[in-house]
Structure formats: C-alpha cells, structure tokens
Image: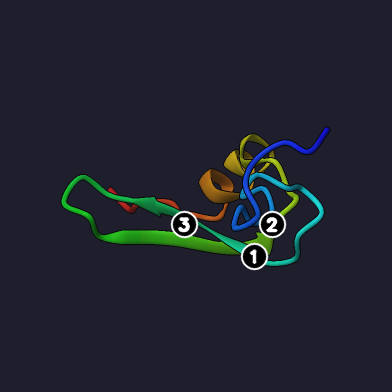
Amino acid sequence: MRKGRADTGPSPVDRRKTGSKHHLLCARRSTPLKALTTAAKVNDVTQTHALVDGVPAVAG
C-alpha cells in the first residue's frame, strides 16, 4: 500500500541529504561574535564549546 499522494516529495528531515549549517554566537544586540560552518549531519550541541571557546577574551 502506498502512503501519501503522487505529488508528495522526499522527506524534509532526511538525514542523508547533503548541505551545511551555519552556527552563530551573537552578543546582546545581535553583534556576531563567532561563526562556524559545519556539515548538515553534525549535531548542534557538539558545536557549542567550539563557538564559546572561539570568542576572544575581553580586556578589563
């Protein structure tokens, strides 16, 4: 038995698809502090340390 109609496309949550993600860490007023680009398959949580550690220390 077929599911869906004939004009139903591929699943938008298919993990096999290629692509990239942009991870961005911003300050309070939307000033970008650090940006990373990773493969689409990379879990977002694993990039948190890389974003935070990549921000230079503030003098003062």
| Residue occupied by mark 2 | 40
Residue at the image point whose x is 67% and y is 61% from the top: 38
Image position of 32 with respect to 52: above or below:
below
**Residues at discs 2 and 1 in contact (Cβ within 8 Å):** yes
Tell me where residue 20 sits by quadrant. bottom right
Neighbourhood count class around disc 3 (C-alpha, 10 Å): few under 14, some 14–19, many 20 upward: few
Left or right of 57: which side holds 20?
Answer: right
- What amino acid is found at the position of numbered circle 2 in the picture? Ala
Residue 29 image point, x, y percent: 16, 51
> Between 17 and 60, which is closer to the camera in this rendering?
17
| Residue occupied by mark 3 | 56
Q: Which label was assigned to residue 20? A: 1
Neighbourhood count class around disc 1 (C-alpha, 10 Å): few under 14, some 14–19, many 20 upward: few
Q: CA distance from mark 2 to mark 1?
A: 4 Å
> Between 22 and 50, which is closer to the camera in this rendering?
22
**Residues at discs 2 and 3 in contact (Cβ within 8 Å):** no
Residue 45 image point, x, y percent: 63, 35
Chain-order first, disc 3 or disc 1: 1
Chain-order first, disc 2 or disc 1: 1
Q: CA distance from mark 2 to mark 3?
A: 26 Å
Residue 57 image point, x, y percent: 43, 51
Q: CA distance from mark 3 to mark 1?
A: 25 Å
- What amino acid is found at the position of numbered circle 1 in the picture? Ser
Neighbourhood count class around disc 2 (C-alpha, 10 Å): few under 14, some 14–19, many 20 upward: some
